[in-house]
Image (cartoon, rainbow, N blue to C red):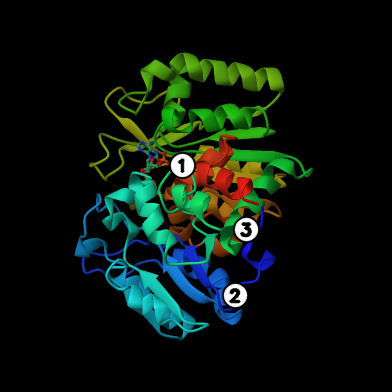
Amino acid sequence: MRFINDIDIKGKRVFIRCDFNVPMDENGNITDDNRIRAALPTIQYAIDNKAKVILASHLGRPKGKPNPKYSLKAVAKRLSTLLDKDVVFIEDFKQQKDLIEKLNNGDVALLENLRFHPGEEENSEAFAKELLELFDVYVNDAFGVCHRKHASVYALPKLAPITVGGFLLKKELDYFDKIFTIKDKPFVAVIGGAKVSGKLDCLINLIDKADKLIIGGAQAFTFLKALGYETGKSLVEDDLIDEAKRIMEKAKERGVRFYLPVDFVCSSSIEDKTPKGVFTYQEIPTDLMGLDIGPASVELFKEALQDARVVVWNGPMGVFEVNAFAKGTNEIAKAIGKLNALSVVGGGDTAEAVEKAGESHNMSYISTGGGASLKLLEGKTLPAIEVLESKS
Ligand code: AMP
């Protein structure tokens, strides 16, 4: 695959597809600008190398219509501060082509939310052709959307005369490649979150690659039920019990150490934020649900992680959004943070949980893409990456 530093961009109009899908509060203020900061190396490189820089991104789900709630205006402002230079905000790229034409070498413009146009999510070639008129070089630095066939990452790079990747994209792909190719062992995968169904392909792939598999979050209950235990009101996917059995059998065949939590912080419902106590997996009351792993599980998982040389973590250990059920996730974040290991954290909820635990700086890498990183853990290729490879 070719990257932005493999080509000459001086004086060229360089379109960089970024992932500026940042969280905002109800007043439209950016509450976490990590994704903007992560895009800076590519943008700064393009500025330093005297390109005319045209940035584009999506934000939220405006469903193909302009909606001020999802405007990238605040992103343009934050970018301008971070880059310490003006960022021209292009509200309507079809009507304001003159603003793009006026860009000098080293200038930066940001287009309004691509998803204000229905063609973006429809992967419309006609929409891609409209964007195509704006630039000479296409750069994909939007790892977080590479698993989607959307126009700006799929139809557009196919049509573009020159198509390359950005530095963030390279970093993401390199880290996920590294966890599967590095010779250091043991390789420990920590998988949590809400549902087995969402992580099934990931578990199946990891069973073939990891030395230890640690299961947390609600999905632990489908495995415990498969082993014949009473799980009370905890979330269980009954239709996946046989699949859970197969995964555990496969782990045994392959000699993968398979860890399940041994105790849980339980309450009557997710809304009931006053825990009713800690119960071992043998004694979950029928009227309660497990919402976090308990202290014995934390100790067990810490011990299992102790000798890890490579760790990949996707999915919180409990309902980390609620303080009463966040301790298990926080403790595992701290335990992974302390390791002398390559630690890679999947994006989305897990990235947020690690940030909340104050452990971000202790991880080797935190992905900017939840869905895209999960696909890589499933061993799948990403459509937008296939396009980049085919154009190299
Ligand atoms: P995922 O997107 O699959 O990684 O799931 C993340 C979600 O799983 C978070 O919103 C957590 O609140 C939720 N979660 C984790 N553990 C539990 C649990 N024991 N019961 C219910 N939800 C959980």
Dot 1 or dot 2: first in sequence order is 2
Q: Residue at x 44, y 44 (%)?
A: 148
Residue neighbourhood size for the residue with mark 2, other residues' Cα within 10 Å, grouped as few (<14), some (14–19), many (≥20): some
* Left or right: residue 80 compared with residue 8: left
Dot 2 or dot 3: first in sequence order is 2
Q: Circles 3 and 1: CB distance less than 8 Å?
A: no
Mark 3, secondary structure of its residue: helix
Marks 1, 2: nearer the viewer = 2
Q: Amino acid at mark 1?
A: Met
The residue where tag 2 is placed is 45
Q: Nearer the viewer, residue 284 or 335?
A: 335
Q: Nearer the viewer, residue 244 or 141?
A: 141
Is 344 placed above or below 47 here? above
User: Residue 366: where, in percent of width, then height?
Assistant: 55, 56
The residue where tag 1 is placed is 317
Q: Quadrant of residue 271?
A: top left
Q: Quadrant of residue 31?
A: bottom left
Label 1 to label 2, Cα distance in Å? 39 Å
